[in-house]
Amino acid sequence: MILRTDRLILRGWRADDLDPMAEINGDPEVMRYIADGSVRDRATTAENLAKWSRSWAEHGFGLFAVELAATGELAGFAGMAIPEFLPEVLPAVEIGWRLGRRFWGHGFATEAATAALDFAFRECELDRLISIRHLDNLRSARVMEKLGLAYAFSTVVPAVQQPVAVHARRREQHRLA
C-alpha cells in the first residue's frame, strides 16, 4: 500500500529503513513522551519494524514508513496500530506518528496523519480512531486538533504510570469534513 501527498510518500517498510528509524528512536527528545521516555536501540527498532510489517497482514492496516517525496529520506512513521499498552480503551485502533526531530515544524506529521486517517476511514472502513498522547505533548495535541480528533478523557498508562489524554474521531465525522 502506497499513499502519496503533496510532499510525502507513505509506504511499507524496507530493510534500508532500519538505520534511519533507529536514529529517530535513539533521540531522547523524540522519545521523551513515548512510554517511559527511554530511547530504543537498533535491535529493538528492528523488532519494531518486523512487528509493524506484520500488522498489515494481521489487521489490514498498520504504520506507514513516511518518506519525503523530494529526497527519499525516511522521516518516520504515521498510521494505525492496536494500543495494547492502554487496555482500558480496547477494542480500539489508534492513529499515531513519530518523526525525526529535523522533520518537526514543517507540517509533515499533520500531512502524513491526514492521509493515514483518510485511508483508515475510507479504505479500511474503520468506524472510530483514537489517538493517545502524553499530557505534556502539546505538539501532538495540535496535530490531533488539526485532524479533527476531539478530547475524550485522560487516564494513566498502567505499565509506566504515564499520564495521557485520549482523543477520538468517528467515521461519520470524517465524511462531513
Image (cartoon, rainbow, N blue to C red):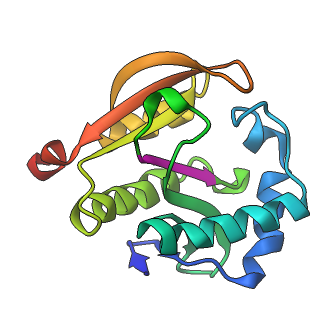
Q: Quick check: 46 above or below 32? A: below
Residue in front for this viewpoint, 7 or 100? 100
The answer to which image quadrant residue 158 occupies is top right
Image vertical order of residue 99 relative to residue 9, above or below: above
Residue 163 sits above or below residue 173 on the image: above
Residue 50 appears at what percent x and percent y? Answer: 70, 71
Measuring 73% from the left and 76% from the top, which residue is drawn there?
17
Query: What residue appears at the point 19 percent right and 48 percent down from the top-left corner?
Result: 171
Q: Which residue is at a point 40% across and 76% down the rendered structure image?
A: 3
Whether the magenta-drawn stretch holds residue 105 is answered as: no
Q: Residue 117 at what x, y percent from top left? A: 34, 56
Give the magenta part as a residue range.
93-98
User: With 168 as the anchor, is 160 left or right in this view?
Assistant: right
Task: Decide: is 124 above or below 97.
Answer: below
Q: In which quarter of the view is residue 172 placed?
A: top left
Name the residue: 50% across, 34% down.
132
Q: Quadrant of residue 53?
A: bottom right
| Residue 83 as seen in the image, left or right of residue 41 | left
In the image, taking residue 172 as reference, residue 14 lies left or right, namely right
